[in-house]
């Protein structure tokens, strides 16, 4: 066996991902040493409660509650605690103690990314975070390195497994949101408090990370427009299917080129996706990131978006990269925010829309709707009207599904408000954006 | 504008990819400088014929026929000439002149990879080759870096755009091989001499590169089992569709775990792929690489497998990586062949098979076929028999489609030979492997 240099590795957190990382580090120690050119010595695992139940068996003597002391003298610190504090404080401490850091903490990077990256820059440390966006799918290196000579135009990502699982089940089984959610919670695909997933917070964090990287721009989390999937019901799913679409929760990161210069838009919302689009066939809890680049054209990266052992794979890839850098020397790529493009608010974004209305079934109603749209600068591409209830003397109710050409979000929402107040519209059933064409 | 250090870049070759690389280097010079931390100065383009027609307009003074002189003093040499010589000699010259090299030359890497990598190792130079496998799709970095802490079990790749285009057209239009090929040649999807594509040579080169990287093992090109698609006809396509499959030319790189230890198999052949498998929906000239890893699970990388500007994106990503290394210092990852697993011959590989036979339609025939298979250690999973021509007194002809359980290739081919000679089999219509389940 080659006599490799030893690197001291500290692990913070032993949850679903952390315990798998610890297990793999021990199990594949020889192979990892060959790959990294150094022996990765797990010095300890910092946890809150040493006696908590873990997913895998690990020697008790590895555990400590004293993260601060564990960090000191470590070459590589892996942070898998999640949350903002004390993760942030520990990572800054690690950076200032001379360690490279590996983290899967999307919440922290999306909110305090610039602080962490700046601190690392100051001392020449590296921050690796492949596991922070789209789990096991290699997307950070492709964006940062492989596409470094190209210009990303747009990213459309299914980056939250829980919501994709729920929407996929609703689509394939015709089930209601609440039933699928309850089932997903039973199976462990959704947490007891599903807010972070179903309201799009998790996806928004990942969108901020991906957009920062793709557009070399600091994207604060509050600049990401966010809508969840709780309003999606079975009838919307059915209507989408009928029209050749499927509803997916998308993280959309887009470069906008206008006469005044370039800007970007970052948004998370449920959108209609054509069934022929590669993203439409991403089923279950899988994730996929579809990237459109100026020269490379369309690329897609597909795989498991979550899961302890899957995410551990991405973490270990980063650990090996960090180790290689320790051995080889030199400074890594670092984070570039040189472009720092302006981020436009959602109101200025243009997409296609599908508007579903219930209207009075009487003469002149379609004309009123059409002229309201036209006055609001929303151009109609397709219309489908079906009678829901016949009138029997009274005016009945009809359903109107309107597909628009590209329209500006602010124009569209103003127009929908005017439609709702127009007297001929009984109910705005849904307004969904159409992405991916 | 930041005052960056200048790096001298030499380009060898100005074909479809080379001319796009030159154009993008000039067009995005400022942005590339920001990304790389250095100005990438295109010192010249070495070509055979300065007056040849190019895809893009480039200043005549950039061109030279003296590659040797251009290389001297360059920091980064980009080789896009293709072929073995003089590309090999120039790259060795570049390495020994102190340059890092970027190449898309799969033929060279598949045949002389170890020589090039060793030469680079000796002087601490780096070899970047993202564009050598699967065009614009980032697959080299994911395999080398992102999955460095994982164990790849299997790669199934659609890595040749021409053959995927042909098979996809045959499948969707029910057309014959020769007609689609002629059409592909007219459209520029296939070369005038299509041998390298349709006989699987191109895919075999890429398979050797991917397997070397995934399994940390030197894979010589002649260790790759190779079959092309020229024997695939419309009736085989129809039969595949009928059975829920599509025929794809696959590069399969597999880790075999046996009691005696680990080994690998690398092979290229047309195979039946279940229509529900993600690879089945890779259409047209697109490429995709499906990776199964122990921890990460299933991953897929999808995109354009060829095309001048698409491939140029991958080349420029490598150029930026090389430039960053020049600025930051340190030694790169290098190629690891530490595992050097034995490569098993095709005869020892196990897969499922679908065997289509024309047999005499008379009593006892199925029994003979079944016992021949059983004696040959080939276990039957499914059988479908249909009458083709009725006998009218004489024995008629029936078609027998047999799906097998996993069998050893050598056993299978011996058994098919015995079947062919058994007297009850009129014709072996096709023997296809089934991959991806």
Image (cartoon, coloured by chain):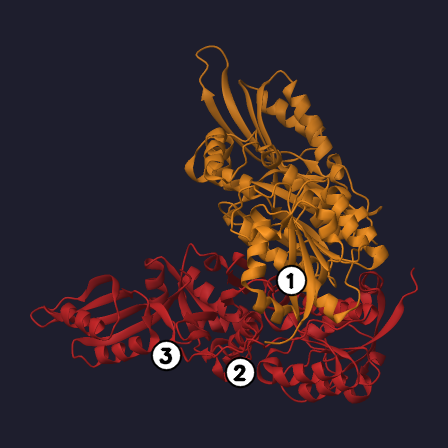
Chain colours: A orange, B red
Q: Does residue A234 lie above or below B71 as drawn? A: above
**N-terminal-most mark, 3 or 2:** 2
Q: Badge 2 local density, few (<14 within 10 Å), some, or many (20+)?
A: some
Which quadrant of the figure has residue B414? bottom left
Image x and y of residue B136, in percent: 64, 65
Secondary element under disc 3, as helix, strand or loop, is helix
Q: Number of numbered discs present?
A: 3
Secondary element under disc 2, as helix, strand or loop, is loop
Secondary element under disc 1, as helix, strand or loop, is strand
Q: Which residue is mark 2?
A: B220
Residue B347: give its label.
Answer: 3
Q: Estimate the spatial distance between the alpha carbons at disc 1 and disc 2, rounded to whole Å.
A: 35 Å
In the displayed structure image, the side of residue B403 where residue B180 appears, left or right: right
Image x and y of residue A409, in percent: 70, 34
Regarding residue A332, the answer to whether it shows in the image is: yes
Q: Which residue is mark 1?
A: A41
Image x and y of residue B134, in percent: 59, 68
Q: Are marks 3 and 2 on the same chain?
A: yes
Image x and y of residue B11, in percent: 76, 78
Viewer-closest of A313 and B423 = A313
Give the position of the N terminus of chain B as an image quadrant. bottom right
Q: Chain of mark 1?
A: A
Q: Badge 1 local density, few (<14 within 10 Å), some, or many (20+)?
A: some
Q: Identify the residue at image location x=65%, y=22%.
A: A419
């Amino acid at each position: 066996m080659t006599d490799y240099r030893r690197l001291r590795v500290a692990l913070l957190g032993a949850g679903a991902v952390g315990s798998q990382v610890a297990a793999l580090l021990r199990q594949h120690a020889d192979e990892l040493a060959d790959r990294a050119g150094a022996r990765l010595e797990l010095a300890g695992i910092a946890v809150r409660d040493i006696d908590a139940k873990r997913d895998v068996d690990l020697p008790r003597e590895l555990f400590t509650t004293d993260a601060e002391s564990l960090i000191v003298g470590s070459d590589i610190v892996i942070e898998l605690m999640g949350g903002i504090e004390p993760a942030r404080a520990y990572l800054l401490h690690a950076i200032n103690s001379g360690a490279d850091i590996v983290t899967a903490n999307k919440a922290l990077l999306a909110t305090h990314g610039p602080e962490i990256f700046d601190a690392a820059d100051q001392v020449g440390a590296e921050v690796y975070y492949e596991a922070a966006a789209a789990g096991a799918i290699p997307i950070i290196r492709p964006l940062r390195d492989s596409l470094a000579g190209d210009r990303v135009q747009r990213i459309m990502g299914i980056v939250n497994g829980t919501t994709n699982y729920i929407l996929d089940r609703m689509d394939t089984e015709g089930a209601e949101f609440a039933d699928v959610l309850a089932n997903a919670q039973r199976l462990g695909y959704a947490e007891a408090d599903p807010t972070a997933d179903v309201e799009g917070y998790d996806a928004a964090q990942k969108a901020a990370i991906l957009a920062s990287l793709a557009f070399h721009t600091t994207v604060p989390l509050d600049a990401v427009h966010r809508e969840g999937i709780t309003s999606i019901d079975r009838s919307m799913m059915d209507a989408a299917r009928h029209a050749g679409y499927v509803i997916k929760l998308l993280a959309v990161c887009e470069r906008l080129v206008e006469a005044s210069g370039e800007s970007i838009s970052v948004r998370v919302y449920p959108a209609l996706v054509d069934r022929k689009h590669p993203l439409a066939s991403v089923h279950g809890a899988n994730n996929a990131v579809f990237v459109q680049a100026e020269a490379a054209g369309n690329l897609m990266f597909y795989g498991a978006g979550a899961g302890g052992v899957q995410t551990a794979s991405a973490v270990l890839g980063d650990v090996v990269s960090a180790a290689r850098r320790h051995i080889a020397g030199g400074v890594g790529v670092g984070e570039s925010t040189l472009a720092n493009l302006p981020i436009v608010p959602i109101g200025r974004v243009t997409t296609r829309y599908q508007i579903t209305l219930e209207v009075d079934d009487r003469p002149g109603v379609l004309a009123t709707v059409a002229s309201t749209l036209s006055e609001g600068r929303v151009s109609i591409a397709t219309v489908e009207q079906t009678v829901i209830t016949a009138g029997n003397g009274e005016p009945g109710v009809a359903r109107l599904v309107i597909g628009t050409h590209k329209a500006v979000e602010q124009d569209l929402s103003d127009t929908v408000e005017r439609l709702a107040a127009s007297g001929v519209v009984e109910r705005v059933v849904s307004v969904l954006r159409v992405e991916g064409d």
